[in-house]
Image: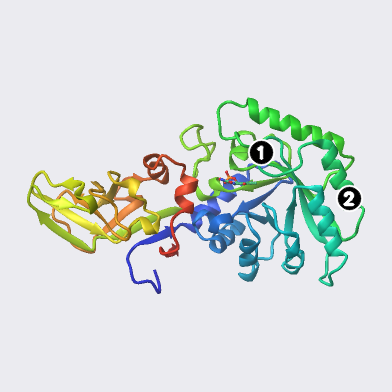
């Protein structure tokens, strides 16, 4: 990647991101909008570049987790609506107005304090708010129709606030058992029935809800993991349309040697050659997010699976090669190589976690290259 001096890099397929968005946009109910969820640096893919690809696929807004992520998008020239999904301290109301951001309201107290501050600052308003309902995620939000109604009435009592959205978040939309999903849906319906009017955006869907519960309420979906081409359920539920993974992770061999039997590899000498073996070294380690628990996982060299042998170091790791291979040969750690595939899901399975976490923990020491 330009400006970097190590062959290790993440390669992000922006065409895949655009196609994944478009495939969802064209199947959404008429009048619905897709907001691309680009928090956590676009799930490790790069927030700004992901956002621009998502726009080409038909996204009309963005969701981020924290104020700083929203500022990054605005400073990169993104002008579409941006919703900050978590709580922003009321002391930053002026920043929210300055960057024209929409913010989540989860308590009456926060809204009261925000209105009080809005009464005392010059920065041009009004403040755009999305009222969050906690229907069972157990994270943030109002929990009863009554308290939502009170917040709506307060918001509508002043010109300083625009009630732009009402939303909830599902915790089991990616599971086969729909009982808890239905309980959350009923709770959200009870809130809707208690209100005389609704805001511009009513939104409940993450990727899993959009894919497997498409007829749920709402006119906007908060599309994250599926945009990156990853199945929200991992292995559990079938894809509704082909999701194209956008992320690959590649490097090159920086050292190749032949060892006789009985030679040790890596810290703690946890691997000993059992015969004459060709060993390659790759410039990637746990400081890049290629974690130590991946010892024993295989990567691809010329389409052949090569096992990671010995403990993964901070910056390098070693693999067993099938034969002598030249220094500089490409190593594919995630992606497609000569007809073979290593998926982020496979890495997640080995790490006993989910691909969301694997993608988000690839560190900034690895450049993102876009194609
Ligand atoms: C409120 C909210 N909406 C939408 C999304 C997008 O979900 P998706 O990527 O499954 O489409 C998330 C993702 N939040 C998280 C994903 O993993 N941990 C989280 O907190 C979220 O927290």
Q: Nearer the viewer, residue 55 or 324?
A: 324
> Label 1: how many residues lie within 10 Å, few (<14), some (14-19) or many (20+)?
few
Q: Residue furthest right?
A: 157
Count neighbours of disc 2 (C-alpha within 10 A) and say few if under 14, some if 14 to 19, many if 20 or more. some
Q: Position of residue 50 (x, y in %)?
A: 55, 59
How many callouts does the rendering have? 2
Whether the residues at callouts 2 and 1 have beta carbons within 8 Å, the answer is no
Residue farthest along the front direction in this orientation? 268
In the picture as drawn, the residue positioned furthest to the bottom comes out as 3
Q: Residue 23: x percent and y percent?
A: 57, 46
Q: Nearer the viewer, residue 81 or 168?
A: 168
Q: In terms of secondary structure, where does tag 2 sit?
A: helix
Residue 364 occupies which quadrant of the picture? bottom left
> What's the residue at 44%, 49% (across, down)?
358
From the top left corner, tell me how far across and down residue 321 is, in percent: 18, 51
Residue 244 seen from this side = no
* Residue picked out by circle 2: 154
Q: Is residue 153 above or below residue 9?
A: above
Quadrant containing the N terminus is bottom left
**Vertical position of residue 280 compared to residue 107: above or below:** below
User: In screen coordinates, is 199 left or right of 239?
Assistant: right
Q: Give the structural element (helix, strand or loop) at label 1.
A: loop
Labels 2 and 1: the sequence-earlier one: 1
Q: Disc 2, ligand 1: is the CB inside 8 Å?
A: no
Q: Which residue occupies the foreground of this view, 31 or 9?
A: 9
Residue corresponding to mark 1 = 138
Q: Is residue 365 left or right of residue 202?
A: left
Label 2 to label 1, Cα distance in Å?
Answer: 24 Å
Q: Residue at x 71, y 32 (%)?
A: 185
291 relative to 254, above or below: above
Q: Residue at x 23, y 49 (%)?
A: 310
Quadrant of the rendering where the C terminus is positioned: bottom left
């Amino acid at each position: 990647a330009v400006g970097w001096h190590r062959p290790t890099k993440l390669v992000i397929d922006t065409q895949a991101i655009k196609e994944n968005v478009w495939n969802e946009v064209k199947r959404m109910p008429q009048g619905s909008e897709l907001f691309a969820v680009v928090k956590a640096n676009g799930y490790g893919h790069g927030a700004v570049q992901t956002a621009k690809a998502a726009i080409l696929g038909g996204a009309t807004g963005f969701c981020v987790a924290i104020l700083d992520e929203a500022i990054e998008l605005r400073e990169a020239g993104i002008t579409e609506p941006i919703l900050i999904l978590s709580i922003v301290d009321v002391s930053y109301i002026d920043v929210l107005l300055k960057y024209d951001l929409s913010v989540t309201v989860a308590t009456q107290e926060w809204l009261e304090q925000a209105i009080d501050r809005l009464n005392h600052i010059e920065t041009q308003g009004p403040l755009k708010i999305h009222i969050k309902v906690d229907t069972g995620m157990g994270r943030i939000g109002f929990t009863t129709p009554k308290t939502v109604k009170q917040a709506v009435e307060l918001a509508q009592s002043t010109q300083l606030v625009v009630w732009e959205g009402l939303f909830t978040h599902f915790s089991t939309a990616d599971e086969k058992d729909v009982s808890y999903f239905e309980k959350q849906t009923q709770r959200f319906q009870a809130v809707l029935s208690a209100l005389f009017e609704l805001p511009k955006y009513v939104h409940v869907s993450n990727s899993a809800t959009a894919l497997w519960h498409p007829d749920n309420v709402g006119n906007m979906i908060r599309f994250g993991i599926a945009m990156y081409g990853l199945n929200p359920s991992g292995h559990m539920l079938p894809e509704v349309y082909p999701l194209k993974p956008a992320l690959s992770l590649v490097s090159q061999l920086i050292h190749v040697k032949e060892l006789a039997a009985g030679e040790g590899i890596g810290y703690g000498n946890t691997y000993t050659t059992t015969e004459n073996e060709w060993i390659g070294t790759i410039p990637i380690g746990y400081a890049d997010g290629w974690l130590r628990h991946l010892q024993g996982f295989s990567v691809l060299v010329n389409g052949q699976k090569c096992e990671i042998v010995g403990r993964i170091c901070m910056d390098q790791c070693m693999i067993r090669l099938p034969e002598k291979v030249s220094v500089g040969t490409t190593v594919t750690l995630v992606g497609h190589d000569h007809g073979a595939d290593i998926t982020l899901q496979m890495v997640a399975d080995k790490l006993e976690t989910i691909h969301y976490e694997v993608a988000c923990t690839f560190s900034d020491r690895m450049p993102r290259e876009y194609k």
